Image: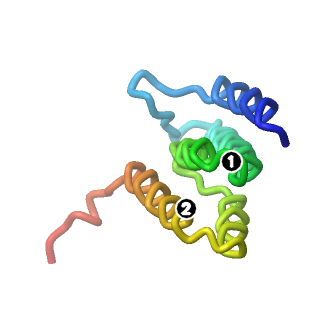
Amino acid sequence: MNPEKATTLQKEFQAEAKPTAAGKSEISLKSNAWFTQFSDRSAVSDQLAKIALSLVDTDPEKALVLVVQSLQGGTVSSVLLEMVQKLARNGDRAFLNRLGTGIGHALAGNVTLDPYSMRKD
């Protein structure tokens, strides 16, 4: 996929994401639409990760930004595994380390604690 097409697709998928006023989409399991919401998040995550995979060789910085964006909804795309495997095969250890750090930070920002995980024993 060429970079221009990837950028166009990225803009389309970002426009489809509907964040709340706080900047994050919230899913209510009490609503009947929860499955649709999860599916939409997964689709957006997959598409951003696919665009990132197509750009990893030509524009790794943009690919890294897209990977982090793909994780903002709390969904991890299986395409990220493909990207990690590709980078490992190519021996790009420096970028692989940066990717791992970016993924860790993005996922840490999506952690939700419930009352049971905060109790003292």
Q: Residue at x 61, y 68 (%)?
A: 92
Q: Position of residue 22 (x, y in %)?
A: 39, 27
Residue 34's quadrant in the figure?
A: top right
Separation of residues labelled 2 and 1 (CA atoms): 13 Å
**Which of 26 and 44 lies nearest the eye of the viewer?**
44
Quick check: 59 left or right of 100?
right
Residue 113 versus residue 22 in the image, above or below: below
Q: Residue at horizontal 68%, vertical 43%? A: 48
Which residue type does callout 2 highlight? Answer: Phe
Towards the viewer: 117 or 107 = 107
- Across the whole image, how many numbered discs are drawn on residues? 2
Q: Residue furthest left?
A: 120
- Tell me the SS state at disc 2: helix
Residue 29 visible in this rendered orientation of the protein: no
Q: Which residue lies at the image location 38% right of the left edge and 49% below the top edge?
A: 109
The numbered dot on residue 95 is 2
User: Which residue is disc 1 drawn over?
Assistant: 52
Disc 1 secondary structure class: helix
